[in-house]
Image (cartoon, rainbow, N blue to C red):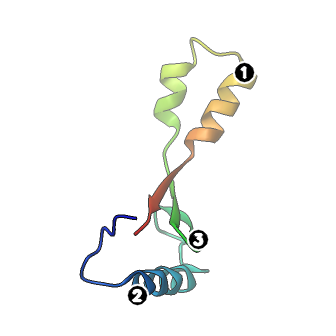
Amino acid sequence: MIHAYPSISETEFAQACLDLETRCHDRLEGTEWSSVRWDGEQLLIKQNRHAGSARNVNQENSSGDDLALELAEMESEDLVVSP
């Protein structure tokens, strides 16, 4: 595995990610993040996205059900951080 953070060990990286997950629990209100989770290999961050612009672009080409699904999928974006 290529280590993207050469100044810290993989153990230090894992601990830092776990610490961030713990600190973010119940503290994301008012931020653009909806969740932070460390799965043991990757730090998974969900970021809220404004879906209003997607409605304008996709409204002409989608039925109501398809549009609702597309908007739900666009409301959050995953950011993955791994060593």
Above or below 4: residue 59: above
Question: Does the residue at mark 3 contact the one at mark 2 (Cβ under 8 Å)?
Answer: no
Give the residue at the far left of this rendering.
Answer: 7
Residue 59 appears at what percent x and percent y?
58, 18
Amino acid type, label 1 = Gly
Give the residue at the far front of this rendering.
Answer: 1
Mark 2 surroundings: few (<14), some (14-19) or many (≥20) residues within 10 A: few
Which dot marks residue 64?
Answer: 1
Mark 1 surroundings: few (<14), some (14-19) or many (≥20) residues within 10 A: few
Residue drawn at the location 53% of the way across and 73% of the way down: 28
Q: In terms of secondary structure, where does tag 2 sit?
A: helix
Q: Which residue is mark 2?
A: 12
Q: Earlier in the sequence, mark 3 or mark 1?
A: 3
**Residue 61 in which image quadrant:** top right
Out of 48 and 36, give the one closest to the viewer.
36
Quarter of the image with the N terminus in it? bottom left
Mark in the foreground, 3 or 2 = 2
Amino acid type, label 3 = Arg
**Residue 60 in which image quadrant:** top right
Above or below 31: residue 75: above
**Count of labels shown?**
3
Q: In terms of secondary structure, where does tag 1 sit?
A: helix
Task: Give how far apart the Cα atoms at labels 3 and 1 are.
Answer: 32 Å
Q: Which residue is mark 3?
A: 37
Task: Give how far apart the Cα atoms at labels 1 and 2 are.
Answer: 47 Å
Amino acid type, label 2 = Glu
Above or below 77: residue 12: below
Quarter of the image with the C terminus in it? bottom left
**4 with respect to 52 (left or right):** left
Mark 3 surroundings: few (<14), some (14-19) or many (≥20) residues within 10 A: some
